[in-house]
Image (cartoon, rainbow, N blue to C red):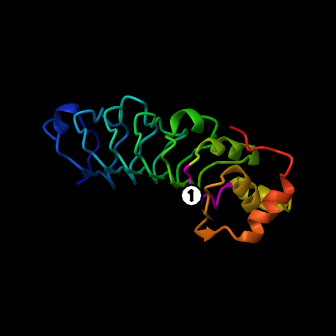
């Protein structure tokens, strides 16, 4: 049986909750989870969520892992209160812009998966430069990957330039040659902040 709606009253009394798995339901919205201050892991994958506004996870400062893959998100979720978030999965949504990343995603983020979204412009990647702890990024397949191929542009050196802490792109480690190429190509520029 799939859950179609959750009310705040249904989540009451869960103050000690550390893991919440709500995957494979038909949730279109989520009530605020401020009554779960110890929550560390939240799986919302395979639902019908169209947005994840600031009120939903406001009280979840200890959240470290969030999976929102396979939903209907058109924009990045607002996760400004999730100071300890390290891993975020947003695969298979409809996200077309990363412009809000500096304002909506926490600096603690180390792993970000944006596979199979609607990211079309290479320019969108510059907004990830603010994520100073980002070590692993997944992008393919997105329309911008095809654009890069058509223009004969290698994304990996550009991403190495944008994120000095970045170690892996699409599950492949960045090589020393790619880092050297980034240093040569962008020697006279600084990463946008």
Q: Is residue 158 above or below residue 80?
A: below
Residue at point 62% right, 41% down? Answer: 130
- Please identify the residue farthest to the top as the structure is shown: 55
Locate the N terminus and report the quarter of the image it occupies: bottom left
Residue at point 26% right, 50% down? Answer: 20
Locate the C terminus and report the quarter of the image it occupies: top right
Q: Is residue 137 magenta?
A: yes
Q: x and y percent of residue 59 in the render? A: 31, 33
Count of numbered circles on the image: 1
Q: Dot 1: within a 10 Å radius of its alpha carbon, few (fewer than 14), some, or many (20 or more) residues?
A: some
Q: Is residue 185 magenta?
A: no
- Please identify the residue farthest to the left as the structure is shown: 13
Q: x and y percent of residue 135 in the render? A: 56, 58
Q: x and y percent of residue 24 in the render? A: 33, 55
Q: Which residues are magenta?
A: 133-142
Query: Is 21 or 102 nearer to us in this picture?
Result: 102
Query: Is 170 or 147 nearer to us in this picture?
Result: 170
Judging by the rendered image, the residue that carries numbered circle 1 is 135
Q: Is residue 90 above or below residue 57?
A: below
Asked whether, in this view, residue 98 is left or right of residue 52, the answer is: right
Q: Main secondary structure of the magenta part?
A: loop
Residue at point 80% right, 58% down? Answer: 183
Query: Is 101 or 46 nearer to us in this picture?
Result: 101
Secondary element at tag 1: loop
Residue 181's image quarter? bottom right
Asked whether, in this view, residue 79 is left or right of residue 158, the answer is: left
Asked whether, in this view, residue 129 is left or right of residue 23, the answer is: right
């Amino acid at each position: 049986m799939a859950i179609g709606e959750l009310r705040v009253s249904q989540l009451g009394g869960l103050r000690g909750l550390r893991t919440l798995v709500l995957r494979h339901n038909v949730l279109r919205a989520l009530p605020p989870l401020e009554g779960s201050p110890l929550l560390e892991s939240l799986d919302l994958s395979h639902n019908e969520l169209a947005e994840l506004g600031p009120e939903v996870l406001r009280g979840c400062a200890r959240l470290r892992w969030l999976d929102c893959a396979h939903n209907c998100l058109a924009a990045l979720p607002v996760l400004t209160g999730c100071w300890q978030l390290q891993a975020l999965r947003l695969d298979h949504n409809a996200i077309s812009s990363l412009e809000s990343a500096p304002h909506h995603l926490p600096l603690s983020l180390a792993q970000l998966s944006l596979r199979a979204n609607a990211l079309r412009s290479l320019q969108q990647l510059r907004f990830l430069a603010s994520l100073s702890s980002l070590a692993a990024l997944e992008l393919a397949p997105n329309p911008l990957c095809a654009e890069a191929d058509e223009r004969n542009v290698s994304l990996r050196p550009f991403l190495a330039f944008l994120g000095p802490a970045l170690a892996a792109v699409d599950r492949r480690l960045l090589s020393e040659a790619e880092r050297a190429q980034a240093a040569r190509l962008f020697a006279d520029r600084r990463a946008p902040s």
